[in-house]
Image: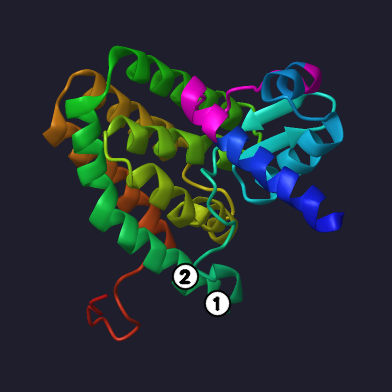
C-alpha cells in the first residue's frame, strides 16, 4: 500500500512540473489554491500536499504558510550544491566567488542589453528600486540584490545562467557578512548604471557597469593591495 501511495505522489510531482511548464509559470508566480489545483490535477488534497512538499524540498516551489505556493527563485537548485558551507576560509571564498563573477557577469550584462524585452527591463527596474528602498531604510537587501542579478541573467536569453548564478550569488550574502554591509551607496549607483545601460541597449556600457560594480566589491575585500614592505602583491 505504501509503495502504491508513493507511486501516486511521484506521478503527481511529475504532473505538477508539467503544469508549471504548460502554464508558463515563472519565478515568484503563485499557483492556484489547493482545492483548485487538486481538481485540475484530479488528485486528492493529501496527495497534492505531499507532492507540493517534495517540490518545495527540491527548491522548485516555495510554500509560504498562510499565503500560498509560489514558483521558487532557486530554480530547483540545491541550497549548497558546491559545498561552500564546508569551506572554512570564508574571506577567501568571498574573494574567489567575486573573481568568478568578474569573469562571467559583465558578459551576461552585455547579453541582457542585447536581448532583454521591454517587459523584462521594467521588471529589472522594479527590482533595482526595491534594492534601493531596502538600503535607504536600513533593511537587509541581500535577497533583493540576488533577485536583481538573477533577473539580469534571465534577460541575457541564456537558459543556463539563471540556474548557475543563484549558486554563485551566495557570494552576495557572504560578502555583506564579510564587509559589515558596506558599499550601500556604490551598490545603488552601479545597479542603476547597469539598468540604464541595459535599457539603452548598450552592451559595452552594461558590461563596464557590471565590471565596476564587482570591482567595488572585490576592492572592499582587498582594501590594501600593497604589502607592509611596500611591494605590490599580485592576486
Q: Tell me: 138 left or right of 119.
A: right
Q: Quadrant of residue 144?
A: top right
User: Which part of the image, by quadrant, shows the C terminus?
Assistant: bottom left
Q: Residue furthest bottom?
A: 229
Q: Height in image: 84 above or below 2?
A: below
Q: Height in image: 90 above or below 147?
A: below
Can residue 10 be found in the magenta stretch? no
Q: Position of residue 137 (x, y in %)?
A: 64, 27
Q: Nearer the viewer, residue 166 or 20?
A: 20
For the residues labelled 1 and 2, the Cα–Cα distance comes to 7 Å
Q: Tell me: 96 left or right of 81.
A: left
Please tell me the numbered disc located at residue 87.
Answer: 1
Tell me the residue at 19%/40% (across/down): 208
Q: In the structure shown, which secondary structural element does the residue marked by tag 2 occupy?
A: helix
Inspect this view and state whether residue 72 appears. Answer: no
Tell me the residue at 35%/68% (across/down): 224
Q: Tell me: 159 left or right of 90.
A: left
Q: Position of residue 114 (x, y in %)?
A: 17, 27
Please tell me the numbered disc located at residue 46.
Answer: none
- Is label 1 in contact with label 2 (beta carbons under 8 Å)? yes
Tell me the residue at 34%/46% (across/down): 161
Can residue 22 be found in the magenta stretch? yes
Tell me the residue at 20%/40% (across/down): 207
Q: Which residue is mark 2?
A: 93
Q: Position of residue 67 (x, y in %)?
A: 79, 23
Q: Residues within 10 Å of mark 1 (few under 14, many from 20)?
A: few
User: Which part of the image, by quadrant, shows the N terminus?
Assistant: bottom right
Q: Residues within 10 Å of mark 2 (few under 14, many from 20)?
A: some
Q: In the structure shown, which secondary structural element does the residue marked by tag 1 occupy?
A: loop
Q: Position of residue 23 (x, y in %)?
A: 51, 21
Inspect this view and state whether residue 68 appears. Answer: yes
Segment colored magenta: 18-35
Amino acid at each position: 500500500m505504501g509503495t502504491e501511495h508513493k507511486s501516486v505522489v511521484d506521478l503527481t510531482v511529475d504532473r505538477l512540473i508539467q503544469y508549471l511548464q504548460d502554464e508558463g509559470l515563472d519565478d515568484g508566480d503563485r499557483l492556484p489554491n489547493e482545492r483548485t489545483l487538486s481538481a485540475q490535477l484530479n488528485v486528492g488534497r493529501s496527495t497534492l500536499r505531499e507532492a507540493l512538499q517534495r517540490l518545495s524540498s527540491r527548491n522548485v516551489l516555495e510554500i509560504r504558510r498562510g499565503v500560498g505556493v509560489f514558483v521558487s527563485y532557486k530554480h530547483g537548485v540545491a541550497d549548497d550544491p558546491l559545498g561552500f558551507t564546508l569551506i572554512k576560509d570564508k574571506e577567501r571564498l568571498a574573494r574567489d566567488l567575486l573573481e568568478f563573477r568578474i569573469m562571467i557577469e559583465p558578459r551576461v550584462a552585455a547579453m541582457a542589453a542585447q536581448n532583454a524585452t521591454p517587459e523584462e527591463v521594467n521588471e529589472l527596474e522594479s527590482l533595482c528600486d526595491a534594492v534601493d528602498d531596502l538600503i535607504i531604510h536600513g533593511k537587509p537587501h541581500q535577497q533583493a540584490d540576488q533577485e536583481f542579478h538573477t533577473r539580469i541573467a534571465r534577460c541575457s536569453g541564456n537558459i543556463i545562467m539563471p540556474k548557475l548564478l543563484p549558486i554563485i550569488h551566495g557570494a552576495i550574502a557572504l560578502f555583506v557578512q564579510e564587509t559589515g554591509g558596506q558599499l550601500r551607496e556604490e551598490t545603488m549607483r552601479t545597479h542603476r548604471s547597469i539598468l540604464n545601460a541595459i535599457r539603452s541597449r548598450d552592451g559595452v556600457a552594461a558590461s563596464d557597469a557590471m565590471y565596476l560594480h564587482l570591482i567595488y566589491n572585490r576592492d572592499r575585500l582587498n582594501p590594501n593591495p600593497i604589502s607592509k614592505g611596500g611591494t605590490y602583491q599580485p592576486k
